[in-house]
Amino acid sequence: MAAKTSATKSHGRSMFRLYFLLMTLVGVIGTLIAWGFLLYAVGKKLIITNDEYIVGERYYELDQCSNTIVMEKQTTKPTEEEITKCKEDKKVQLIAARKALFKTDMLSGAIRTILFFVLLMTHYPRFMKQNKKGE
């Protein structure tokens, strides 16, 4: 009977080792991916200027300023002054939206990084401790 209990104990230890190994790997991979998202957000903010962002991703919103307005069965074409003012207002709105998007990207990336890093730091030392016991 002694052989059965020692086999069960070693099997239990190997399950713990496997668990700590998997959680450590999830922590490492998750932390690296979260860091990647953070670096991507920062790089995108630093490299792409506001004008490039507007032209590349949101130019259709500036084009809407030139569209004719249909109100109560009447169509009116906006004047050049109205189009210019609309485009300036839209640019301000789009830059503010970009700043807000950057902040949300940074916040979500930082939270993910912290969570995966905590997962890594709580499981890695235990994994190493289990490995030293198993040797």
Image: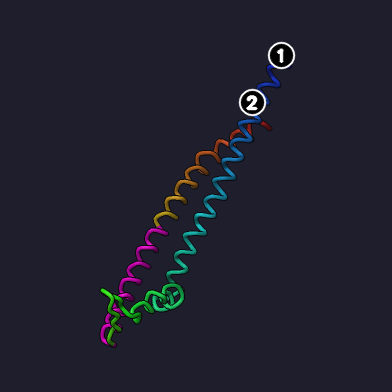
Considering only vertical position in the picture, is 11 above or below 128?
above
SS category of the residue bearing label 2: helix
Q: Provide residue 99's location: percent of width, then percent of height.
A: 35, 66
Total of numbered circles in the picture?
A: 2
Which is more toward the observer, 70 or 62?
70
Q: Which residues are magenta?
A: 80-106
Q: Mark 2, residues whose alpha carbon is within 10 Å: few (<14), some, or many (≥20)?
A: few
Look at label 2 and name its amino acid.
Gly
Q: Provide residue 104's location: percent of width, then percent of height.
A: 38, 58
Look at label 1 and name its amino acid.
Ala
Colouring of the image: rainbow
Which of the 4 image quarters holds residue 26? Answer: top right
Q: Main secondary structure of the magenta part?
A: helix
**Residue at the disc numbered 2:** 12
**Residue at the disc numbered 1:** 2
Residue at the image point whose x is 42% and y is 54% from the top: 108
Q: Provide residue 118's location: percent of width, then percent of height.
A: 47, 44
